[in-house]
Every structure is written in C-alpha cells, then in structure tokens.
Image (spheres, helix red, strand yellow):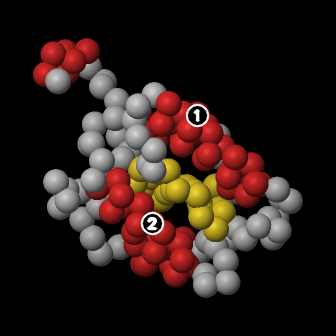
C-alpha cells in the first residue's frame, strides 16, 4: 500500500510562487500533482477544496505568501482559516484528518514548501484511497 500513486491538488498564490520553479521541483515521482494558480491564496474557498476531494484528490495543499506580506493584506489568513475548516470537516465526516496542508513561502523559499508537500504525500499514501463514492452500485462492493 505504501507504493501506491496519490493525487494531490495544489492551490498556490501566483504572487508568491514561481510556477516554473514549482513544477520543476515537484516533478520526478509517480504521484499525480495538479497545480492550480490563484490570484491570491485568499481566493480559495471551502467549496473549491471539497470539490478537489470530490474530483478524486487524495490530498490538497495550499501555498500562501509569507504572513504579513500578502499583496491583498490578509488573503493568507483567510486561506489558513478555510483550510482549517475543511480539515475539521473531513475529520468530522470520517474521511480522516491530515489530508490538507497549508504552507507559506518564507525565508527558505520553495525548499520548505516542497518538503511539506512531500510529507503530505507520504501521509496520504498510508490513508484509504477512496473518499467519495460516485456510483451507488459501489456501495454493494464495500
């Protein structure tokens, strides 16, 4: 089970993350990573995060700019609260906690971000694969 491929949706602030560097740093493994730029991490919404899981994501990461340096003042704080709300919701409905990550680009640049995304991948890899049942006939199989 530890060798299975995982699907991670990565939402990131386009003002603080260089998409070319991000793609270069996260390439090179068998996991499926879908990177989605946002004009500000504060634009992320609980519905988008849950829709990512409904669409087959095993985990979701949100990368914000450094606290205190948001171009839109407090977008990174809003993103942090929303990711926390989704984490709580996932735990409450029994889909497991630890499937979300909120991280920020800081003094270490992308090094910390890539390291935390790798930790999320490993954590999610050990969790059950199927989160949502799309077809009621699949209920009989479980």
Task: Work out whether residue 127 or residue 33 is closer to the camera in this orientation and state it.
Answer: 127
Task: Work out whether residue 135 or residue 111 is closer to the camera in this orientation and state it.
Answer: 111
Pointer 1: what residue? 47
* Element type at mark 2: helix
Query: Image height check: is 39 above or below 50?
Result: below
On the rendered image, what quadrant is the C terminus found in? top left
Q: Name which quarter of the figure residue 2 lies in.
A: bottom left
Query: Image height check: is 108 above or below 93?
Result: below
Which residue in the rendered view is the most extreme toward the right?
A: 73
Image point 68% across, 71% down: which residue? 16
Pointer 2: what residue? 117
Mark 1 crowdedness (10 Å alpha carbons): few <14, some 14-19, many ≥20: few
Residue 70 seen by the camera? yes
Residue 104 percent across, percent down from the top left: 64, 68
Which residue in the rendered view is the most extreme toward the left?
A: 141
Position of 62 compared to 99: left or right?
Answer: right
Image point 74% across, 49% down: which residue? 78
Residue 47 percent across, percent down from the top left: 58, 34
Query: Image height check: is 133 above or below 52?
Result: above
Image point 66% across, 43% down: which residue? 82
* Element type at mark 1: helix
Residue 33 percent across, percent down from the top left: 38, 59
Mark 2 crowdedness (10 Å alpha carbons): few <14, some 14-19, many ≥20: many
């Amino acid at each position: 089970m530890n060798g299975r491929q995982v699907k991670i949706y990565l939402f990131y602030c386009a003002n603080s993350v260089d998409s070319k560097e991000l793609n270069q740093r996260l390439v090179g493994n068998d996991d499926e990573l879908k990177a989605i730029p946002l004009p500000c991490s504060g634009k992320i919404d609980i519905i988008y995060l849950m829709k990512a899981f409904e669409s087959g994501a095993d985990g979701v990461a949100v990368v914000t700019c450094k606290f205190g340096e948001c171009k839109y003042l407090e977008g990174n704080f809003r993103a942090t609260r929303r990711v926390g709300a989704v984490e709580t919701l996932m735990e409450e409905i029994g889909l497991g906690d630890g499937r979300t990550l909120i991280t920020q680009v800081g003094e270490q640049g992308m090094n910390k971000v890539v390291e935390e995304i790798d930790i999320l991948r490993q954590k999610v890899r050990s969790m059950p694969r199927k989160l949502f049942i799309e077809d009621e006939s699949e209920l009989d199989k479980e």
